[in-house]
Amino acid sequence: MRIILAAGFGLLLAACNQTTQPGPTATTAPGTAPPAGTEAAEALPPIYEPLVDMHRVKPAKYAKDLAECRQQAAPQEAAARAARQQQAAGTAVAVGATVASFIPVSTFRQAHTLANATGAAQDVGVATAQAGAITADQATADYALVVNTCLTHKKYRILR
């Protein structure tokens, strides 16, 4: 039973550490490396998509301006993504502690020790997840503010 729980906990933690590898994009030819500094932005979807009035706007110019604004907001995006990872790690610890609390033990002393350890791990996991969620929400709001302000300075009408 303990082996099954340990394997399940290991798989849960491994699932929290998934990354994507950047591949060739439409702007780079296959077999060539993308320009430096663009790997992270092209590998992951944006965390915020502004709603812009596209009346009398050239899509190519807007795409270029949006890319520039997202580049300006890159530090806020990195902070938001790191905080989301912290939130996922805290959730994994809390879930792992909850699962570990069901491990059968033979004595009362072992049960008491296990209950104290899993309770502490759950508390730490929940606190970490909450802190990550708060930080991620703040960083995402900051990212949206930077992108919206940048687009506004470039004379776009932001609808939301």
Image (cartoon, rainbow, N blue to C red):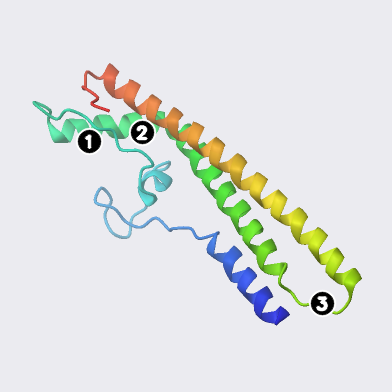
Q: Is residue 116 above or below residue 80?
A: below
Instruction: From the viewer's perspective, tell me whether residue 145 is left or right of residue 10.
Output: left
> Residue 95's spot in the image, x, y percent?
62, 61
Which residue is labeled 2 in the image? Answer: 70
Q: Nearer the viewer, mark 2 or mark 3?
A: 3
> Residue 154's spot in the image, x, y percent?
25, 20
Q: Residue furthest left?
A: 56
Q: Nearer the viewer, residue 82 or 159?
A: 159
**Which label number is shown at residue 132?**
none
Q: Nearer the viewer, mark 3 or mark 1?
A: 3
Secondary element at image label 3: loop
Amino acid, disc 3: Val
Give the mark nearer the N terminus: 3 vs 1.
1
> Label 3 to label 1, Cα distance in Å?
60 Å
Quadrant into which the N terminus falls: bottom right
> Label 1 to label 2, Cα distance in Å?
10 Å
Give the mark nearer the N terminus: 1 vs 2.
1
